Amino acid sequence: MAYSNNPRLPAVRREAVRLVRKGWGIRKTARHLGFHHTAVMKWVKKAPKDGRKVIPTLSSRPKTSPRAIPREVVGQIIFERKLLRRCAQVVHASLRDTNVSLSTVKRTLKRYHLTKERSKWARHRMNVPRPFAEKPGDLVQLDTIHLWQREGSLVYVFTLIDVVSRWGYAKVYKRINTRSTIFFLKEAQRYAPFAFKMLQTDNGPEFSKFFHDWVECHGMHHRHSRVRKPNDNAHMERFNRTLQDECLKRTPRKRYAKALEQYVDFYNLKRLHLGINLKTPYQVVLSS
């Protein structure tokens, strides 16, 4: 039979030996347990005389590996991985002088647990198709901006923009988590003159499954952008750039909160946008 890692198989072997020594035939025991009779014969020969100990599953690892890569090469792969902190392709490119293949580099990194593998607890997302936005609120994009302070700590600016009207909102938070994201979304919904229907975010931890479940429970829909496809959130990226150039870079960091509040009002009520025919977001919302 094929090699098995079933943890209960040693106990099954002991039960087979017990039945044979009790008086059952080899073939009858094999049919009862669902194994071949030759396997049962081998178990009986290997079993200890007292019959109390289980027959463990021996390792299938070969005793010798003549084609294994040298330890020096393994050490170089591990050293380059820890030095560069990059993927297997970059590590392989840095080892061009060493005669080693890309598959060997990947296998070595995986064997020594130096790769970031997908968690077995991660839930698979069935992504919702992108809607065709016709009215304000049909598609609203969210994102976060990470800003360093002089003390070495981070400040997070949560941002939101409507694709149709370019209506935007932003606020500063000291922590980035699902709780802050939900608070920000509630304040943005109170500020906006229209209801949010579809929310689109990237795959950041602040937009995890808890945020997704909360959004779905409150009558909205949530979809994630494609991984490594920033163009899916092009309106959001442009808004973040505008926000930094016209507000954050001109304001001391201690006054970010008040400056953002004033700039958001100016952005939505007075600032003309080229993308909406030199109108303001407020004018687009009124005409929709």
Image (tube, rainbow, N blue to C red):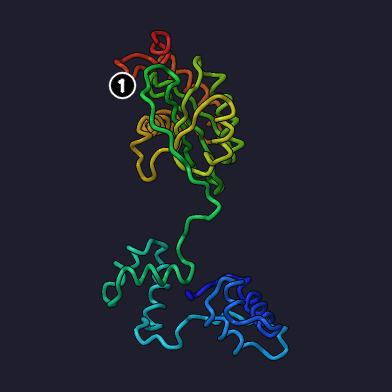
User: Could you say where residue 108 lies in the image, as x and y percent from the top left?
Assistant: 41, 72
Q: Nearer the viewer, residue 31 or 71?
A: 31
Q: Is residue 66 above or below residue 238?
A: below
* Rendered view: 210 above or below 277: below
Residue 154 visible in the shown view: yes
In the visual, does 57 lie left or right of 53? Answer: left
Relative placement, left or right, of 122 versus 92 is right
Residue for point 42% across, 69% down? 109
Residue sitting at x 55%, y 82%: 58
Q: Amino acid at mark 1?
A: Gly
Q: Residues within 10 Å of mark 1 (few under 14, many from 20)?
A: few
Report the number of discs: 1
Q: Tell me if residue 277 comes above or below residue 223 in the rendering.
A: above
| Quadrant of residue 45 within the rendered picture | bottom right
From this view, report whether residue 7 is shown above or below residue 239.
below
Q: Is residue 9 left or right of residue 60?
A: right
Disc 1 is placed on an element classified as: helix
216, 159: nearer the viewer: 216
Which residue is labeled 1 in the image? 275
Q: Position of residue 112 (x, y in %)?
A: 47, 71
Quadrant in the rendering for residue 50: bottom right
Please name whichever residue, 38 or 94, is drawn nearer the observer in this view of the structure: 38
